[in-house]
Image: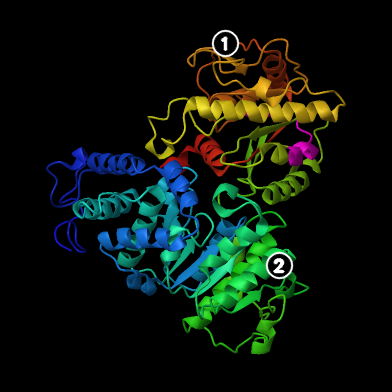
Amino acid sequence: MDGGCQKGTCPLQSCPSPAVSGIRRGNPEPWRAASLFQDAIRTLNTLQTNASYLEQVKRERGDPQTQLEAMRGFLERSGLKVEDLDQLNIIHVTGTKGKGSVCAFTERILRNFGLKTGFYSSPHLVQVRERIRINGHPISKELFSKYFWQVYNRLEETKDSEHAAMPAYFRFLTIMAFHVFLQEKVDLAVVEVGIGGAYDCTNIIRKPVVCGVSSLGIDHTSILGDTIEKIAWQKGGIFKPGVPAFTVPQADRPLEVLKEQAQRNSCPLYLCPDLDAFEKEEKPLRLGLAGDHQRSNAALALQLARMWLEQQGYLDTSEGRDPWPSPEMSLKKPPPLAPVFRPGEPMVQGLQATEWLGRNQVLHHGPLTWYIDGAHTTSSIQACVRWFRQAALNEEKPADGSEVRVLLFNVTGDRDTAALLKLLLPCQFDYAVFCPNFTEVSTVGNADQQNFNVTLENVLTRCLQNQSYWNRLMEAKVGQDPWLSPAEEVEGVGGWLKPAPLHGSLLFMPPAARPLNANSLVFPCISHALQWITQGRDPHFQAPASRGLHPHPVASSGAVLLKEAASIRVLVTGSLHLVGGVLKLLDPSLSQ
C-alpha cells in the first residue's frame, strides 16, 4: 500500500493528531505520549455510529454477506487480507451468556502452556484498551496509540469516491485487534463475537482452529430475531467447514438449530460433558470465577483449549482422552458428547487463576460489600440472583441485625426491564437505586467513558421507567394496586420528573403525592448514586463534598440507615457499562 505507516516505520509519520505535531522520530516525551493516547481515544469516539450501524444491520439482515463484504473492504484498506488472519490460529466464541467468561478461561489455560496469547473481547469496563489483550493484559497506552494511528491513517489515505466511509467503532477495533495480534506475533488469538455471529464483523475469520457456543438465550432481539431458534441460527453462523465446534447443553430446539447449522457448514459439532466428568472425586476443580453457572463455561473452555492444543500439535491426540464418537454418531440428535479427558496441571491451574472483572465479583470495602455482576439477560440475571443469595443473603447477619441491602441497576438496549427486575425481587432489597451508565453528569473529562449515541435526557427517562417498573412490582408484592398507566408515568425529564439543577441536589424526585414505600431513587450519574449509597463509609470511594441534605423522604431516611448499618450489601447489575463505571470509581487504579 502506498503511503501511510508501514510495518517497521514510525506510526506517527502521517498522524493527524495535534498532539504529535512535529514529532517524527524517537519516543515522544511522556506527556506527549499521554496526549497522543487521549487524541487516539477521542478520534476513536468519533466512529461511535453504533446506533445507526445497528439499524443498518436490521435492514440488511437477510444478507449477511453484505456485512462481511463491507468488513472485508475495510480490512483490505487497512493493509490486511482475510487470508492473513489464518496465521492467528483463532479460537472463535459466541453465545448469549458466558461467552466472555469462556474466552477468559480458555485464554488463561493456554497461557499456562507458555503460549503468547491474544484476546479480543467487548465491551470494555473502564478503558477501551481492555478489549485488546496480550498475555491477559490490556495493551499499553503506547501500543494502543501506535496501532490506532497506523490503522486510522491507512483508512484515511484510502478514501475515495467509492470508499469514503470509515468503519464504525466496533469494526475499527476489530480490525485494529487483528493488526496488533499479527504484528505482536501472538501464538493464538481468542476472539469473542460482538453480537450474534452470522452478521458479526468478527465472522470475517474464515479458518479458526476451533469454535465454541456458550449458553443461548433471548437478547438483542431487534437484531438477532425474537425467538430462541432465530438467535441459535445467528450463533451457528460462525461454524466453518471442517472446523470442530463445541457447545454446552442447550434446550432441544436451539440445539437442533445449531446442529442444522453445523451440518449445513460441514462442521463437526460436539456437546461438552459436565465439568463433573473432568473432576476427581478427591480433588474437585476450583474456578477463579464464582457462581455455579461458570461450571459449564469452564467445561467448554477445557474442550476448546484441548482441541486447539491437539490441532496445533502441542498434545498427543490420543493421549489421555476417551475415543472420539464414530462418524455415525454425528448424524444423531442431539450432537454426540465430546470425549472426556483428565486435565493436566496447566489446565487445572489455568481454571483456578482465571480473572474476569465485573462477573460475579465481590469487593469488601469496610462495612460495604459490593457484589458486581454485569448480567443483562433473563437467564444471566437468574444466575446472578442465585449467586448473590448464596454469597450474601445466606451469610450470618450482624449481631444487631443492622444490615441494609441495596440494588444498583441500569439496563440498555431492547431488553425487557420489568422481567429482569421481577427476577431480582427474591433478593429482598431495602432500596433500589437507578442511574445512567455515566460516571459523572459530564463525561468530557474521560474520553474512555464517552458515548455519543445517547443523551442524558434519554437515559434518565429510561431510569425513570425502570424505577416505575420496580415501584409497581413492590406495590404488587404488598397487595396494593398500581397507581398510573405507563403512558401517564413517564413524560421525560421535562414532565413529571422535577430535577433540581445538575449542580445542585443529587436526587431526581417524583411528585410528593407519589407513594414512597417502594424505597427507590433515581440519580443522574453513577458517582451521585455511589455517594448516597456509601454515605462516606467506603474507604475506597472518595465522595465529592457534601451538597447538603436531601429533601426527599426516602433519601433522607435511607441515609440515616446507611450511616448506622453495621453491614451494607450492594448488588450492581443489569449492564456491563454500569459495572464498568462503578469499578472505575471504586478502584481508580483500573484507569491507570
**Which label's residue is closer to the chain start, 1 or 2?**
2
Residue 249, numbered circle: 2
Residue 581, numbered circle: none
Instruction: Look at label 1 and name its amino acid.
Output: Gly
The quarter of the displayed image where residue 34 is located: top left
The quarter of the displayed image where residue 472 is located: top right
Helix, strand, or loop for circle 1?
Answer: loop
**Image quadrant in which the C terminus is located:** top left
Boundaries of the magenta span: 422-434
x%, y% of residue 398?
Answer: 80, 33
Looking at the image, is mark 1 or mark 2 nearer the viewer? Answer: 2
Position of residue 76 in the picture relative to residue 1 (left or right): right
At 25% from the left and 39% from the top, the residue drawn is: 31
Residue 548, numbered circle: 1
x%, y% of residue 319?
Answer: 60, 88
Q: Is residue 481 visible?
A: yes
Depth check, front residue: 297 or 569: 297
Q: Is residue 583 magenta?
A: no
x%, y% of residue 508?
Answer: 60, 18
